Image: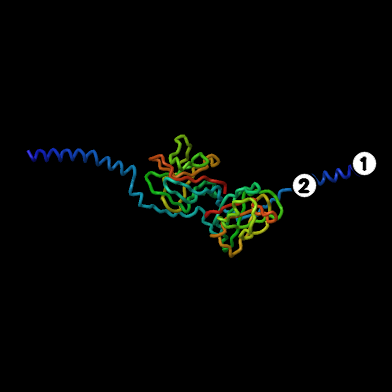
Amino acid sequence: MDTRTGFRLSHRKWILAAIGFPILVAAWWAFRPEKLWINQKVNEPAPFAATTDPQPLYTGRLEGKAHQTSGRATIYRTSDGRQYLRLTDFMTSNGPDVHVVLVQTDDANLTKEIVTDQVDSVELGRLKGNQGDQNYDLPASVNLQKYTAAVIYCERFHAIFGVARLEKF
Amino acid sequence: MVRNIKTALALVALTVTFALQASVYAQDSMHVDKTKTLETGTFHGKVHKTSGRATIYQEADGELLLRLTDFKTSNGPDVHVILIAAKDADDDANFLNSSTERVELGTLKGNEGDQNYEIPSGTDLSRFQTVSIYCERFNANFGAAPLEKF
C-alpha cells in the first residue's frame, strides 16, 4: 500500500516536472534573466582609417536666444594637437560687434537673452560671417571640461544671439 | 525742384543700401574626409537605461553606415538596431506603435561599446530620423536617438 502511494506521488511529480520543465525553459528563453548581469562588450573601429583628419571631440546644435540662430557647433582636434571650433549650417542675424565665445554650460547667464553681469568666457574671435561654415581656433590652454557651451554673443549690447551646448562626440 | 529730386534719390539710395545690407558669408574649408558625417544624435532611454551617440556616415563608395559610440544599454534577448520613421521615440511609452515604419539594421552586437551597422542602400534618411534599440520579442524600445544634421 505504502509503495503504491509512493509510486503515485512520484508519478504526479513526474507529470509536474514534464510540464514545469518546458515552461521554465521557455521562460528562460523569453527573458534570458542572466543577461541582466552579463555584459557583451564590442569595440569596432571607426569606418575611416585616416587618423590624420581632424577628429570631432564635442558637438551640439545652436539654439536661438535674442536672435534666431541655428546650425551646428563642433570642436575638432587636428593630428598636430590644435583644437578649433567649427560652425556648420550656420545662420544668425547680422549685428555689431558679435563674437564667438565659450562659456560654462551651467552659467546662469545662458538662460537669459540679455546678460547683466560679467560672463566668465573664453574669447574665440569676432564672428566671421552671420551665415556659412567657419572655423575658430581655440586657445591651447582652454579647459574643455569646463567651457562646454559655444555662444554667439554681441558684446556691445550684451545680447546672447545663440547657444550650443556641446556634448561628447 | 531738381534739388528735391536729388535729395529724394539720395534718400532712396540710402534706404536701398540699408535694405541690401548683405549677409556676410563665411566659407572656411576643412580637410575633406573621404567618409562624410551626415547625421548624429544622442540616446535617451528610461525603461532600460541607454546612453551614447549614434552617427550616420557616408563612406567613399556611397554606402551608409550607422556607428554607435560611448554606447551602453541593458543586455536583453533578441535586441535589434532599427531606424524608425519618426522624429523621436517616446521612451515613457516603452513600446513602439506597431504601425511605425522601420528599417532593420541587424541584431545588437553588444550592449556596450563602439559598433557599426550597415544601412540598406536606398534608405530615405529624411524619413527614418530616429535610431531605436529595440527588443523584438517584447516589442520594447530600450532607447532611442533622434538624429540631426551634422
Q: Are marks 2 and 1 on the same chain?
A: yes
**Residue reaching furthest left?**
A1
Looking at the picture, tell me which residue is in the foreground, A86 or A165: A165
Q: How many neighbours does mark 1 have within 10 angstroms: few (below 14), some (14-19), or many (20 or more)?
A: few
Q: Which residue carries the number 2 mark?
A: B18
Q: Secondary structure at mark 1?
A: loop
Separation of marks 2 and 1 at Cα, in angstroms: 26 Å
Q: Which residue carries the number 1 mark?
A: B1
Looking at the picture, tell me which residue is in the foreground, B83 or B118: B83
- Report the amino acid beneath label 1: Met
A94 horizontally vs B82: left or right: right
Q: How many neighbours does mark 2 have within 10 angstroms: few (below 14), some (14-19), or many (20 or more)?
A: few
From what the image shows, is residue A77 above or below residue B96? below
| Image location (x, y in percent) of residue A154 | 67, 54
Looking at the picture, tell me which residue is in the foreground, A83 or A65: A65
| Image location (x, y in percent) of residue B70 | 47, 54
Looking at the rendering, which quadrant does residue A100 occupy? bottom right
| Image location (x, y in percent) of residue A117 | 63, 57
- Report the amino acid beneath label 2: Phe
Residue B126 — which label? none
Looking at the rendering, which quadrant does residue A43 occupy? bottom left
